[in-house]
Image: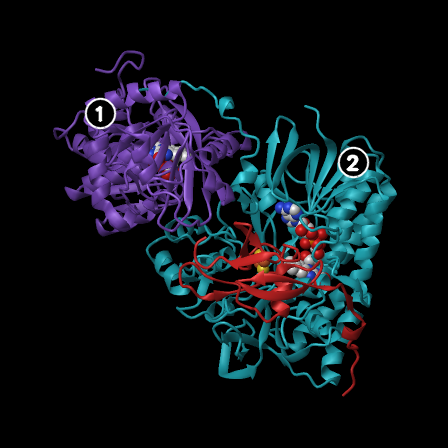
Chain colours: A purple, B red, C cyan
């Protein structure tokens, strides 16, 4: 059996899946490989925050477009848009909040500052001591656990070949494109997209490209069901806390605290040295959380490059090979940038520009 | 009928009885036993309803793992099979959330 | 790094307590941790303080002896202490403990895991009805509070445990409607040669069965309970004859009863081992997914030992010996003299006890026909009330791992952490997707090992201690 696919996508996270859907739309024979289950990398374990308040200024148009995609995906991904507050407890944090959210508002996010009274009315269970808060009605969340299920169903409907628990172990260039070794049959393809999240670096390395990728080990925690305590997405001016209470009553707590481990050594592990202050900050902001029982803490790998902008485009120097990843706020932006990536691979003009993986990462992005 | 294993129930001596409250009703318990055991003796098998289908649930694994027996004490979700009763303790069912 | 003690032992059952005693004998400083107030584990669980006096049985006597031995040793025993997280930091083990509503931390140079087993109850229609208890779980009621599971009880399950439970109900003055076991009499007869490795235990079992027979209590061999009726209490228990693979056959029969003790074997509790960094492999004869552990408790991770039923279901007798071996191995690592004589003697004792244990375990290993007992409406995941149909539909869309089913449906995300559904989910995936037994692993373990109050984890927080990190790039 020697079918050649028009494109093989390594990585069935949100980036790979969203791109695959776009390519299949126009009839490309597409195959997606994932070393584990679909959508259970970063895309399946992230905190699910869809917040314009934590997006980078230059990425705001992408995030706004991303929000529209999520809204359309709707209940199938547990989408909710209750709005979000970012809190400051000190003068320093208030200044930080003022500076940063103003810039984001200028970039097009409907962020405004609210009075403490207005905040209290909306979220009476928040702790006293808040000195400033910003609000964005567009903020919300989706349930990242549903990423795999959502894309599995959509890709099945779109006739995309999907191989789960099937790692790409070796990539080589052939006359007609690429050959990918896997524990199952090898995959032959004309084009290749590496969308392997925290694992991009070694895969690009196999094609002789050294990308300056670092990997963070983000942690998140969840409580068991609680009676309704708050409805908006709550953030902290420093970014050290994000939390939301899902409709089932569970409270999901994150904030970019770091665990341990590397993608290469298998899964990351949480360390209580960072989980504890994360939870403590959550309780500080919302004291009633203290009586909740924490049921799970976990980690996921999030990749980045030195300028913290995405890698989205041609793999430098390798014809017909592409890379997509390292997107800050990648869950939010994923469905949209994946579509752009699809257009790029198809040789079409993209609605917004992409992020050349061959750029100089030490220069200010133009 | 020949009984090889004797009924020894009458040889068991227990501590004094005390009273606590479950869902507003007084329940008697021997000092030192768990909330779950006292409720079982009182015939109170249903200790909560499940969050998604509101079906009655009660003591199941008896070893603090399954979380079926959880009740609310002092505002906290607590495993009844591991919590020792005290005089006047107020125990509420969780019913749904949490 | 310096540590609070040489060796921390998690679990004060027959395995852990003996490991601790052995290691302390070798001169090591040992801390023994267990969420139960008293040592004893599941099999030798101590009576609660509500019992002023009661007749002894072999379990209570063995437990009392163990508790005395722990008391007389140099071990520091922390009862009522839940271990909820295990981390390796530099070259020491760091454990997070829950005592009351407080979190404590401790460190140890070596760690012995003796977490024992939990029960597998295969889902059947009505198994969530109050009044249905785990078969092994029910023994906790007899040992701790000397209380009966009901007034008229059906005892159902495989292996010796069903008969032990029946005998205890009889001893506590209860009434048994019937004992229902999927094992046949000839399976028992075939197991006897291996079980005669421990003639004492075999004889005890024979008495339990003889008592039921001479007292006219029905024993339904090669039968299984296939449904329970009743909503807020058990009204009736339905059962059927089963084939050798435990598939229900023939007509459904009904017993009136107000309670049911139901179990389908034991599963090694491996979550602590996974958190400590051990990978699992499937060993059906040991009760399912286990870490690779040598007879003396040595594992692939340095200064980490596993012993007792948590390493494979071989029963209390084997747990005692493996505990001692693990204690010996751990102490030897810290320079204690090891008597080669004692070591060899223990190894051969373990082999003998394991032979008995394997035979008992083999009788109780769940067989494929059990999968035919649940109906589409039967709840599989108790925490989230997910039915067989829910889970099967999810599997059919391509979710063929426990992690995928968990993510898609929340099966295993409830407060029990999947302990009471994941074995059934694995089996269901294998069955539905035509995969071989033992090919679908349990989900990725996530701490904490038990639900922990957030306030206990968040202890001692000072806002000013928050790291002033570089703000995220704008
Ligand atoms: C409910 C139950 C009842 C049983 N009853 C019998 C019986 O009557 N007769 C029989 O022959 N076999 C029985 N067994 C089988 C049992 O496994 C025995 O073979 C024996 O108890 C095994 O000894 P062990 O030391 O390996 O584990 P256990 O005796 O189970 O000891 C493990 C100990 O670890 C503790 N523990 C586990 N995790 C944690 C944690 N995270 N924090 C703190 N403490 C922890 C537990 O509280 C427990 O005391 C039973 C099993 C179960 C699950
Ligand atoms: C804990 C955490 C919290 C986060 N919170 C948020 C948030 O609240 N909001 C937000 O917008 N973003 C958040 N993010 C970021 C976001 O999750 C990621 O940016 C995004 O999911 C990345 O998607 P991806 O497809 O690039 O990577 P992944 O989802 O990791 O997908 C990569 C896939 O590649 C597969 N793979 C790797 N190597 C191979 C190989 N050799 N062969 C085959 N397959 C391979 C992996 O198995 C994986 O499934 C968070 C991230 C983490 C870790
Ligand atoms: S009965 Fe299972 S936790 Fe109490």
Q: Quadrant of the C terminus of chain A?
A: top left
Q: Viewer-proximal residue, A200 or C402?
A: C402
* Residue mark closest to the camera, 1 vs 2: 1
- Where's residue C132, x and y in %? 56, 69
Q: Residues within 10 Å of mark 2 (few under 14, many from 20)?
A: many
Q: Residues within 10 Å of mark 1 (few under 14, many from 20)?
A: some
Establish if C212 lies above or below A343: below
> What is the number of the mark on residue C42?
none
Check chain identity for marks 1 and 2: say if they share one. no
Specify the subunit that label 1 lies on.
A
Q: Residue furthest left?
A: A349
Residue ID for mark 2: C331
User: Can residue B67 be seen by looking at this rendering?
Assistant: no
User: Can residue A241 be seen by looking at this rendering?
Assistant: yes
Q: Is residue C216 left or right of residue A138?
A: right
Q: Viewer-proximal residue, A84 or A15?
A: A84
- Where's residue A74, x and y in %? 24, 47
């Amino acid at each position: 059996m020697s079918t050649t696919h028009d494109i093989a996508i390594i990585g069935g996270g949100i980036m790979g899946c969203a791109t695959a859907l776009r390519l299949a739309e126009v009839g490309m024979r597409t195959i997606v490989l994932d070393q584990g289950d679909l959508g259970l990398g970063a895309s399946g374990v992230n905190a699910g925050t869809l917040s314009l308040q934590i997006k980078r200024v230059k990425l705001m148009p992408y995030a706004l477009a991303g929000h529209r995609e999520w809204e359309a995906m709707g209940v199938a991904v547990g989408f909710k848009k209750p709005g979000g507050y970012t809190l400051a407890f000190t003068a320093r944090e208030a200044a930080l909040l003022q500076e940063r959210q103003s810039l984001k508002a200028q970039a097009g996010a409907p962020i405004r500052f609210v009075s403490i009274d207005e905040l209290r009315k909306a979220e009476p269970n928040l702790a006293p001591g808040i000195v400033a808060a910003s609000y964005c009605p567009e903020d919300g969340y989706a349930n990242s656990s549903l990423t795999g299920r959502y894309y599995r169903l959509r890709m099945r409907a779109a006739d995309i070949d999907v191989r789960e628990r099937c790692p790409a172990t070796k990539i080589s260039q052939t006359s007609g494109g690429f050959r990918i070794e896997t524990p199952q049959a090898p995959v032959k393809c004309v084009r290749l997209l590496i969308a392997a999240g925290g694992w991009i670096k070694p895969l690009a390395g196999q094609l002789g490209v050294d990308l300056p990728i670092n990997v963070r080990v983000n942690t998140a925690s969840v409580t068991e069901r609680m009676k309704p305590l708050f409805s908006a997405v709550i953030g902290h001016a420093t970014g050290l806390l994000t939390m939301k209470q899902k409709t089932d009553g569970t409270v999901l707590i994150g904030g970019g605290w770091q665990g341990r481990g590397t993608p290469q050594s298998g899964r990351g592990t949480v360390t209580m040295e960072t989980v504890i202050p994360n939870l403590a900050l959550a309780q500080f902001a919302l004291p009633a959380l203290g009586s909740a029982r924490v049921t799970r803490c976990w980690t996921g790998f999030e990749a980045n490059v030195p300028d913290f902008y995405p890698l989205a485009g041609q793999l430098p120097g390798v014809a017909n090979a592409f890379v997509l990843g390292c997107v800050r706020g990648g869950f939010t932006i994923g469905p949209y940038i994946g579509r752009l990536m699809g257009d790029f691979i198809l040789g079409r003009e993209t609605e917004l520009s992409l992020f050349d993986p061959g750029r100089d990462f030490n220069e200010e992005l133009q | 009928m020949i009984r090889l294993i004797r009924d020894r129930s009458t040889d068991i001596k227990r501590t004094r009885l005390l009273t606590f409250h479950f869902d507003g009703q007084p329940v008697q318990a021997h000092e030192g036993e768990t909330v779950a055991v006292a409720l079982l003796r009182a015939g109170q098998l249903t200790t909560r309803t499940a969050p998604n289908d509101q079906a009655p649930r009660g003591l199941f694994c008896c070893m603090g793992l399954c979380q079926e027996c959880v009740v609310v004490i002092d505002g906290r979700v607590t495993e009844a099979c591991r919590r020792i009763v005290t005089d006047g303790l107020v125990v509420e069912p969780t019913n749904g959330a949490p | 790094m310096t540590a609070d003690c040489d060796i921390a032992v998690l679990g004060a059952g027959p395995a852990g307590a003996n490991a601790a005693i052995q290691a302390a004998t070798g001169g090591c400083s040992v801390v023994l941790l267990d969420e139960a107030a008293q040592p004893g584990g599941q099999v030798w669980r101590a009576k609660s303080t509500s019992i002023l006096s009661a007749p002894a049985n072999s379990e209570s006597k063995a437990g009392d002896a163990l508790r005395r031995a722990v008391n007389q040793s140099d071990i520091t025993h922390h009862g009522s202490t839940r271990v909820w997280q295990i981390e390796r930091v530099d070259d020491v083990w760091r454990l997070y403990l829950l005592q009351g509503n407080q979190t404590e931390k401790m460190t140890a140079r070596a760690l012995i895991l003796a977490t024992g087993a939990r029960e597998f109850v295969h889902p059947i229609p009505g198994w969530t009805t109050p009044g249905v208890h785990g078969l092994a779980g029910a023994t906790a009621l007899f040992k701790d509070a000397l209380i009966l599971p009901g007034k008229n009880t059906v005892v159902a399950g495989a292996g010796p445990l069903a008969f032990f439970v029946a005998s205890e109900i009889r001893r506590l003055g209860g009434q048994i409607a019937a004992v229902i076991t999927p094992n046949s009499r000839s399976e028992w007869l075939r197991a006897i040669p291996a079980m005669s490795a421990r003639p004492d235990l075999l004889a005890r079992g024979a008495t339990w069965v003889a008592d039921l027979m001479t007292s006219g209590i029905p024993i339904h061999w090669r039968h299984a309970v296939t449904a329970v009726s009743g909503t807020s209490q058990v009204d009736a228990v339905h059962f059927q004859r089963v084939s050798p693979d435990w598939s229900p056959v023939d007509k459904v029969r009904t017993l009136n009863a107000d309670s049911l003790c139901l179990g389908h074997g034991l599963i090694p509790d491996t979550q602590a081992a996974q958190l400590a960094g051990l990978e699992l492999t499937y060993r059906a004869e040991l009760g399912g997914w286990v870490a690779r552990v040598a007879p003396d408790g040595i594992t692939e991770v340095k200064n980490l030992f596993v012993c007792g039923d948590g390493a494979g279901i071989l029963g209390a007798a084997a747990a005692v010996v493996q505990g001692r071996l693990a204690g010996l191995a751990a102490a030897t690592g810290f320079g204690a003299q090891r008597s080669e004589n004692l070591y060899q003697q223990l190894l051969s004792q373990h082999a003998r006890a394991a032979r008995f244990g394997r035979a008992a375990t083999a009788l109780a290993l769940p067989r494929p026909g059990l999968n035919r007992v649940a109906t589409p409406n039967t709840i599989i995941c108790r925490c989230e009330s997910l039915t067989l149909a829910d889970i099967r539909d999810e599997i059919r869309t391509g979710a063929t791992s426990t992690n995928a089913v968990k993510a898609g449906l929340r099966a295993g995300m409830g407060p029990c952490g999947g302990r009471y559904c994941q074995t059934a989910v694995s089996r269901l995936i294998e069955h539905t997707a035509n995969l071989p037994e033992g090919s679908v692993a349990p989900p990725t373990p996530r701490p904490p090992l038990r639900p922990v109050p957030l306030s206990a984890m968040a202890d001692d927080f000072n806002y000013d201690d928050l790291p002033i990190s570089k703000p995220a790039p704008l």
